[in-house]
Each structure stands twice: as C-alpha cells, then as structure tokens.
Amino acid sequence: MTDGLSASELAATVRSGKIEPGTVVAEAAQRAKIADAGAKGLNAFLSVQEEAPSVPDGALSGVPVAVKDNLCTLTLPTTCGSRMLEGYVSPFEATVIRRLRTAGGVVLGKTNLDEFAMGSSTENSAFGPTRNPHDLTRVPGGSSGGSAAAVGAGVVRCALGSDTGGSVRQPASFCGVVGIKPTYGRVSRYGLVAFASSLDQVGTLGATVEDAALLLQVIAGHDPRDATSASRPVPDLMERMYDGVEGLTIGVPREYFAEALDSQVRQCCDTGLERLRSAGAKVVEVSLPNTRYAVPTYYVLAPAEASSNLARYDGVRYGSRAANAESIADLYEASRTSGFGREVIRRIMLGTFGLSAGYYDAYYGKAQEARRRIARDFAEVWAAGSDLLFTPTYPTPAFPLGERLEDPVSMYLSDVYTVTANLAGIPGISVPIGAVGDLPVGGQFLAPHWEESRMIRAAAALEALMASEVRPIAWDTARELGKRM
Amino acid sequence: MNAHAIDLECVIGLEVHVQLRTDQKLFCADSTRFGDQPNTNVCPVCLGLPGALPVLNGEAVDLAVLASLAFGCVVHETSIFARKNYFYPDLPKGYQISQFERPLATGGCSTVETDGVSREVRIRRIHLEEDAGKSLHDRVAGSTAVDLNRAGTPLIELVSEPDIRSAAEARSYLQQVKQVLEYLDVSDCNMEEGSLRVDANISIRPRGVDELGTKTELKNMNSFSNVEKALDVEIRRQVGLAERGQPVEHVTLLWDEAKGDVRPMRSKEESHDYRYFPDPDLSPVVVPMDRVEAIRAQLPELPVARRLRFEGEFGLPAYDANVLTSTRALADYYEAVAAQTEDPKQASNWIMGPVLALAKERGVSPGDLPLAPEELAGLIGLVQRRRISQNAGKDVLRMMVYRGVSAQQVVLDEGLTQIHDVKHLDAWVEEVLAASPEEVERFQAGEHRLQGYFMGKIMKASRGKADPGEVSRLLLQKLEVRSPR
C-alpha cells in the first residue's frame, strides 16, 4: 500500500496517521526478504531490522532507510563487509543515524558493501557479492552496492552510502538510481568507519533526486564530534529544486569524454546535454588538464590513509582474533591475514609502501601536490564561468560479476570520473540519463564547494527531461526477482 | 669527563615528555585522573573504536603554548597533527597522534648549572601529542594486561639540541625544565606516576670536533638520579669502546635499575618506520598571534627572574633566594610572609629552617602546612619584639602547626611570654648563683666560659621565659658585684 510513494509522501502519510510506521517497515522488510532470497537473490542486506518502531514526527516519519554497513548503528551489527568485524555491534551510533532517527526515519537494515568500502563492484564483501537488480548476472557497482541495489529494486526509497572515490555515485548509475556525494565537510563522518578520512563522505541514494535530496537535508550539518565537518548553515535543498536549468552555464570537461568512454554511454550523455541546452542551459566545453593524474593520485592517497585507519583492527580489543598466536607479532599477523580480504590487504600494502621512509616524497608527497592541482583545475573552471560540470558517472554500464576481479588496475582506472570530486572535496550527483539495453546509465553533475542545491536543481531538471529514456525503478522488482529464482 | 689518551667529550640531547594538567584528554572528554580502576576513563575515541573521531581539546593547546613561551620558543601560527604509525597493544588506533614536520613551537632555550657555572641549552622544538595506554606485565600471570585510562592524555614533548655535555648537566637541565613547568602549573611533573618521562640521545667525539658521533638512545629511566646514573654508565661504555678502537653502534638501550646497567632493546622492538603523515581527521592547529600574546600575558614570573628579584628586593643571599624560589608555592609563601614582617631575612631564616624541617617531618610541602603566612609572620613578630625567645618560638611554631592555632594563642596557653621584668629576672639569677657557690668562685677565678652554665640554669628555672639578653646583663653585673677583688 506504500508502493509508488516518494519518501516525503510516505512521511506525510505516516504523520497524518493514515498508516502505522510499523506497517510501512514490515512491508519494506518483506520486500527486502523477497529481493534477497535464494541463491540468485540480490544479497543487498546483511541484516534487517524487523521491529516496529515508534517514530517522532519529522521529515522522514516512518520512512524505511537502508544503511550501508560501515555506518555505526546501536542494534544491528556493523561489519564493514569484513570477517574482521563479523558480529561487531558498535556501542555508539553514527551522527547521521541519530539525525535520521530524530527525523522519524527507520533503519530498515544494513547493506552489503565492498569490504571497508574498498571496491567498485561489491564483490569484495566477505559475505558474498550483491547482484544488480536490473540484471542478476551483473554487479551493482560499489562500494555502496547493497544500498544502490535496495533502492534500485524498490525495497526502499532512499538509502545511506559512503563515497570515497565514487562509491555512492557509481553504484547509483549501475542500479538506475540517484546518488549524491556532498561537499567534504557537509555531513558528519562521526560513526562512519573510516576508509580514507580526507576523502570519505557520507552520501545518499534515492529513487529520485527528491528522495536523495530529502535524506541529505536530514543528515547534513555541523557536528562537533567531527573536526572536519563544516560549521556553516545548510541551505534548504528542496526550495529551488524545480526551478530548472535556464541561465545555468554547464561546463563539459573534454577529458571526461576520452577514449575509455563506452560509445553508448557517450550517446546517453550527448542526449542529456542536448536536452539541457534546449531547456535553457548554456553548455560550454571546458578543460581539467590534471584529470590524468586523478586515478594514480587517488590510489596513492586513499590506500595510504587506509593503511593507517585499518591499523586498529589488530585482534587485541575487538573484532576477529586469530587463535593460538605465540607472540603479539604473531597475533597481529595471523588476525589481520585471516580477518581481511584480498583487496583490503592489497590496499594496506600499497598504502604502507607509499608512506615508507624513502618513498614518502615520491608517492605521498607527489600525490598531495597532484591533488592540489586537480582542485585548482576545478577552481579555474568555476572562475571562468561554469556553474556546474556535466560528465558521465562511469565509463561503462554495469559489468558482469567476476569480470574484473583478477584485474584490479582496470577496475581502478574506471574510477576516473568520480575520484576527482573526492580529491577536490566538491559535491557530485549521479542521475539516471538512459540505458544500454537493460542496463541503466548515469550522468554526473559536479558543483563548486557547498553548492549542492544548484547541483540538485540541475539533476532534478535532467531527471524530468530524461524520464522517457530511463529504465523506471521497478516497484514490482522484488516480486519479479521472486519469479526469476 | 676524565682525560684519556684522546680527549673525548660527550654530547647529550634529551627528549622530555610531560603530561599536561588538563581535566580531559587531548581528543575526547574522558578524565585524565591517575590511579582510577583500569579501563574506566575510556570512550569510543580513546579506545579507537571503528567510526570514532578525535576533536582537539583547546585547553591543552593553551597549556602547551604557555610552556613554549616560558622556554622562549617561537609559537607557530599553524602547526599540524601527524600520525605516528606502529603496532602495540596499548596503542588502540595503531597510531599515535603527534606532531612531526610542523610542531607547535621551535627554537627555545633553558639553562643548566653545574659547579656554580650556568650555561644555555637550546630547545629545538616543543610539540603536542597524545599518550598511549599502559601495558601491565605483572597484573595477570602469564599475560600482559592493558589499561587504556592513560591513552589520549595530552603530552608535550620538549626536544633539546645536543648541547648537554655531562650526566650532571643532564640532571640540571631536567631540574630546570621541571621547575619551570611547575611554575607554569601546566603539569604535575611526577616521574613516579609517569607524568614526566625522559629519553636521552648520547654520543661521544674528540673535543674540538664539530661533527657528532654515532648516537645511542637511552630509555626507561624513571627518576632524575637514574637519568644521571644511566648516562654515566653509557658514557663510560662508549668511552671504553673508543679506547679499544671499537665503533659505537646505533642502538636503543634500556636502563636496568636493578643491575645498574644498560641493555640493548631487542631489534624487533626498535625497527620502526613510523610512516608519519598529516592526520586527515584533524584540521591544522591555528593559534593566532593575538591568542599567543594573550597567553604570554599570563606567564608567571619564572624561577630565574624571581630569584634575582628576591636577592634585590629582599636583600637575600643567593643561597636563600635559590632555595625559596625552588617551587612557585614556596616562593609565593615566602613573599606572603615577608610582606608582613619587618625583616625579610628573618622570614627567610624561619622558612628555610624550622618551617621546611616541619614540612619534611610531616611529609608535605611547606605551603600545605596548616600555617598561614600571616600566622608565621605573627610568630616572627613576637620573637622580634622579644615577647618570646628564639628557642621558645620554635616550640611555639611546632604547637601552632600541630594544634592549628595562632602564635598568640600558644604563647597565652603556655604562659610563654618572655619576661623582661628585672625583679623577676633578678630572683632567678639570685637563686641560681646561690645554689652554685663553687661555680661562682671558679668564674671569678677567671673561668668565664661558665657563663653558659649559669645562663642554662637560669633559663631552665624560668622555663625558657626569661629574656636572655637581660639575664645575661644581670648575671654579669652580679658576678662583678660578688667579685672579691
């Protein structure tokens, strides 16, 4: 009975008393169960909360929200998709979860992810891969693949993810949903299990721009527990959402339309740009010359920070501890070797190397310099008159499960369109713009620091302009999935 | 150092870690109290739980700035926290938050004084960092227990230049540093409780040579006298090597107090590459110049300045001034007493003699005796006005302290008012002379040292109340009168 209602409509219905929040949550839990059931299920959720909560009146009253399993919650475990934290229940909850609950939202369950958010396919989870709701043989993207699949399958209208190099936007594009990565510092990281602290940002996913924006509105804002969260007011993100793109100058960075881009994805982008132009936007070609350094820069800095952030998982105080270790060094080695998966170990090794004496300047130091240049590229295009940039979110649609597992470098290289926003700290949004066969394709807007509202407005306009091209969120996908098993 | 075949000098640099006296830890709100039940002053932040983030305690920065200014350092407007990465069970995050390339302050100095000669020792840097927890190897048989109450306690590290030339100078440097820090009231400086800890770097070189020899690092010295002993042992060891023509190896040595010797750490314990990098969870520490100046205005008068002032203003000998300024509390106490007495030297005599003796007897610092400055000044006044004798005064002081009453009250209670009245005194003199005819004869025969014998008898007869000056005059007068010649 809640099918087809947007998050805000659902909240209004609950607030009016026409439906009990318990009913809403039970229905969503039922959808989650159906979607995930069986060997060919989505495997989007790692845990589901079925208790009927009592909820306060707020923007999200009774709205079930799927939460990536690297955000600390009080009742459900927080595993980060890792054996290392299997069964770990946090004694405190993330600030974003507290804000979500204060606004009446309900944590429906914790969603699957690449272990510690390291990956672009959700295949690096210790608890098995998540499948793409549009094609069960393909990946949902990652690392917030569980959250994207849950929204894409119609289990929930909105979900929380985290975006370190594209981990909200890329799975959003693969699953045909909207994904927002806010400006670094817009949302508290307190209670987000750190991957790369200078790049991590909690983001939102939604069936529509409005759903994703509503959730962002609830979780954004200064948090005294996070020294990197900005103490600046959060504007009303919905106020000008439907004002259209007339008068906006949209830059198209030529480096984002290079050879690696799939021709059909390019076609979707071109159609999108045409319609933006016809809706009154001024489209200009721009250049971000340091884009070529983005992937190598990211893959030096993110693993470096990760190698330090993940040092705490040593088997001493919590989490998985290897049995029969003979010395403390053995305990560390055995616990970490058995507790972490391949990709996590690979990145810890990479990061440790990049910070080592004798290599620091050549790797970490150089990467910091490249990061500054990438940020400067953006500053220059804003100064030259672009209000926003438009790019593809990812070079291809969703790829088949297992296809890239043995070739991590090709997987890394494809992050080129998303990592730049994290390196520069600017916000980005991925919005569905079309499809290649059954597979959704996303386009990305990037905006200057703190201009989420402008970016959301353009995305809402494009969403409306492209409605005929995109694969709709299948409200009966859960049932469909049931039939296909 | 002794002369040898080659004239060698030793070169010592000291690293002093000092816990700052804040109520709360450096990056969370837990108490820094010493001696509580293990693992009770802990929270997700100092336990290093997944998702927790540090937030800087500004009070610790202020105390560190105060200390930096007291040593004449330049306080940098911007300094940066860095992570020092290593694994240890009492280091919950797997890294310590410290400062590395951009410390809080640089370029200060302190003094050392040996054999009455004073020299400057340069201080290279002062930086802020968090303390680790404690590994307890004797709590649980066969296991190491970890207490994380101390984890996250704010520390400053003062790093000297290698300007120290002997173990005795090292001790003097530490005493001066400790004295200044106590004056500032930034730390307890309690070595037994670990709130002040010292590591040393030592090398030797032929006198007159500029380059430094290979250094060894010396740790685990838990008192100033142990620092001096350990350095002496290590200097002798290095000189011995040099005399045998053997090289000094770069090793870390532990002082073994029981054996009175140094032993090398196992190589595993020291082969660290700390992989320092800026902590992305914390913004740079910014101390604006006006803040620095506001803190500078709070600097108390420091020991050296106060000593010189005591010599000038109160006319005290250098020795007195030195003792009285040894701690800020004692100096404050002295000044309060001196302000209420006519003779500052008398005040010094009383404090350095009987008051310090009583304090030592009761195991407290002089300021903690139940003896308000005005009470002591009152007592000194009674003696100076000859209401009571010097000796009676000492007894009165003891009774004041133990009974907690004023000098006036003790004198009244005990009937100790000095008696100047000639009639009274005359009676005692007569009584004693009458009882000692033999001694009178011997005195008159020229044995004048018997005057002391008579005085003693008379004072005893008066129960100490007789004015000794007056008694002496009367005594000599009477012995003259009785003279046969």
Image: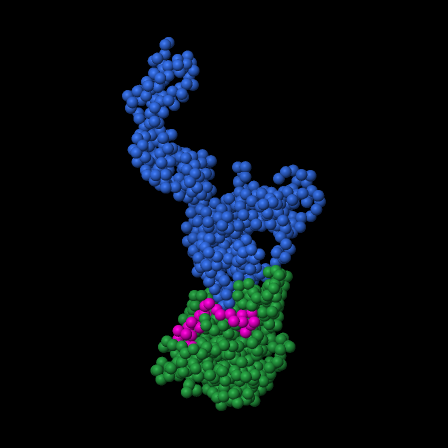
Q: Nearer the viewer, residue B116 or A276?
A: B116
In the image shown, does A104 or A254 lie closer to the viewer? A104
Quarter holding the C terminus of chain A is bottom right
Residue B212 position in % (x across, y down): 64, 48
Q: Chain in green?
A: A
Which residue appears at 56% of the width and 55% of the height? B141
Residue occupying image coordinates x 56% and y 71%: A83
Report x, y in % for residue B383.
Answer: 35, 31
Residue A272: x %, y % from top left:
51, 86
Closer to the camera in the image, B117 or A32: A32
The magenta stretch spans residue B425: no
- The answer to whether residue A316 is visible is yes
B469 shown above or below A33: above
**In the rendered structure, which segment of residues is drawn in magenta?**
A80-106
Q: Is B229 on the left or on the right of A282, as rendered?
A: right
Chain B rendered in what hue?
blue
Q: Is residue A16 left or right of residue B12?
A: left
Q: Is residue A224 left or right of residue B420?
A: right
